[in-house]
Amino acid sequence: MAEIIIMPKLGFNMDEGQLVKWHKKQGDKVSKGEVLFEINTDKTTMPVEATIDGVVLKIILEEGEFAPVFTPIAVIGNQGENPDSVLADEAKVSSTEPVVEEKTEEDIKVSANTSSNSYDFDITVIGGGPGGYVAAIKAAQEGKKTCIVESTHFGGVCLNEGCIPTKTLIKTANIYEEIKEAENFAIEGLDISKVIVSMTKLQNRKNAVVNQLVNGVKGLLIGNKVTVIEGKAAFVDHHTIAVGDKKITSENFIIATGSHSFMPPFIEQEGNTNIITSKAALELDDVPKTMAIIGGGVIGIEFAYLLNKLGTEVTVLELMENILPMVDAEVASMAQKRLEKDGIKFKMGAKVKKVQDSKVIFEVKGVENHVEADVVLMAVGRTPNTEGLNAEGIGIEFDRKAIKTDLQLKTNIDNIYAIGDVNGKVMLAHTASHEGIIAVENICGKNIQMNYDQIPSCIYLEPEIACIGMTEAQAKEKYTNVKIGKFPMIGNGKSLVEGDTEGIVKVIIDGELGEILGVHMYGKHTTDMIAEIAVAMKLEATAEEIIETIHPHPTVSESIPEAFMAAFGKAIHFL
Ligand code: FAD
Ligand code: NAD
């Protein structure tokens, strides 16, 4: 079978390459692994090898010519094969441009009732965030004819206005803080009074990081031969969507349309320019003098941390008695104390009633109070994106504002799945991606379910918070014999080296079987450590098995087996 050799993409920023040298001529024999030609990117010259044994049937790009990434350069195959028909077949299936046939209402009716072979695609994914793009790549890898429709930016909230931009800004805030603390690390001669964060340069860096990742996603989709369509999709029937005036039919659909910031009805946003959401908070060109943050969940706390480090006076107003609802209360309270020490003010049990210009009016135990702030950030949760999708119109069931799915990610309509924030289960990027893979596997005939008890969650303060599974309170509600082990970071050598010994590893174990029910950590590098516990829980490892696992020294990860040992009263490095 002949193979088309394409211009490879050798980096996120590579859009095209130049063919600098051919090592073979048309008609030459070639063996798998032999160098065919060399290409020049803007950074380097790279040899490209043959991927099969055969003959160079056709050379498309000559020495010195340029070609966009993923476009054909040559065809290799058996003597006598027709390279032009191979190229023509490939062009039919792998168009990178939106190729959507115009369909009449009559066409739609016909296509909705015909066999799978008559659909435009096997799987169409609506939404190109971390749920949708991962699902589309997986579907293409499984040999499905796949299409993805995205209305705004590939990468979704995660890459464009969520995980990645927040962490890019936080990285600079952390460097700024470390510079201010340089003397603690024996660095002298820095005039701290002259050190400033340039918001313009920070925004430029954030945009560069985002663009590189977004382009990378597009490259991955195209490289995996997913048909990419830009536009907003709406259902016409169970097997048809409309994107603008085009109609696309598909045997299966995966809805991955994400979510947007929730604005409570009591907020009159219109005309009140002081109120912003996380999206606008990521675009700030100046550091506000004062900010009130409504909601002490993950978004509220990450922004409180960031802006406090950049010099804003921050007040967080939280309805409950604890910040960060998914984190064990003891761990969350440690983080809150540290944030308070850093200068962030907290109003707990605060029910916000109204925002009037710069005044946030709230009530604590029936007593009305207010805080004044230049900017008010609303961070009280997110709402699934279903507006304009016509999901209700074709009979898809909802659970409040979210699209209802079972654990296989299937909606009440057999060929339609919903993944990520839009199903409202766990609004995290890695959950969306994993759900995407499970949905595709199930469409491909497997019968697998999502396990929502084993999803790690990370909060990017310094020290970091990372947790998985039950909190102590949740475990005690469900199990009669719960063992708790705690190891404070003060007993961990690497934390002392890092200059921050605040924090704890807290493990929650079923006392009968040693099953790990939950782990909640506050400390340096903990977001990189939690995956160990995710693997352990997935493999049903016991506390003893973690204790028996050799952890490298010196690392903060040594505090994990120590915490499990502490659950049996036998921590080595703490009394
Ligand atoms: P989204 O990322 O929202 O993508 C949905 C896509 O669908 C969008 O691109 C949208 O344009 C498109 N779309 C919508 N409707 C249509 C339509 N009708 N037709 C075509 N396209 C459509 N999670 C983490 O795990 N870690 C973090 O550190 C983290 N930080 C965050 C920080 C902030 C400030 C925010 C707001 C969120 C953060 N999250 C984080 C959550 C994470 O961003 C989301 O859970 C994740 O993006 C959800 O992925 P998704 O694919 O379901 O949806
Ligand atoms: P959230 O649900 O995490 O927190 C909202 C908070 O607002 C809760 O603590 C709630 O008690 C409080 N609240 C609700 N109404 C209030 C009111 N009227 N007055 C005062 N407080 C009120 O929601 P979020 O912080 O907006 O985040 C949304 C989603 O984005 C979450 O699911 C989160 O997992 C995800 N996210 C994740 C990360 C991360 O993984 N690092 C970062 C940001 C966002």
Image: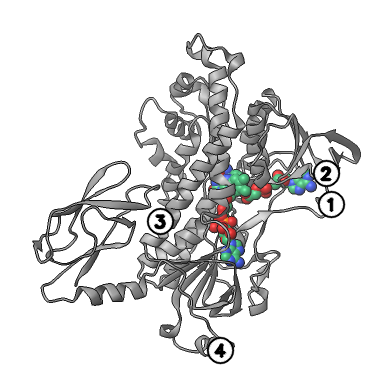
Q: Farthest residue to the front: give it.
A: 64
Tag 3: Cα neighbours inside 10 Å, few (<14), some, or many (≥20)? many
Q: Separation of disc 2 and disc 3 at Cα? A: 45 Å
**Amino acid residing under circle 3:** Gly
Residue bearing mark 3: 219
Tag 4: Cα neighbours inside 10 Å, few (<14), some, or many (≥20)? some
Residue at point 50%, 38% (across, down): 527
Residue bearing mark 4: 109
From the viewer's perspective, is 562 left or right of 334?
Answer: left
Q: Quadrant of ligand 1?
A: bottom right
Q: Secondary structure at mark 3?
A: helix
Residue bearing mark 2: 352
Is the residue indicated by label 2 positioned so its CB lies within 8 Å of ligand 2? yes
Q: Marks 2 and 1: CB-CB under 8 Å? A: yes
User: Which callout, 3 or 4, points at the residue further toward the start of the chain?
Assistant: 4
Estimate the x, y position of residue 364 in percent, counting from the top left.
Answer: 85, 38
Q: Secondary structure at mark 4?
A: helix
Vertical comparison of 456 with 234: above or below: above
**Amino acid residing under circle 2:** Val
Estimate the x, y position of residue 188 in percent, counting from the top left.
Answer: 50, 9
User: Which callout, 4 or 1, points at the residue further toward the start of the chain?
Assistant: 4
Residue at point 24%, 52% (across, down): 64
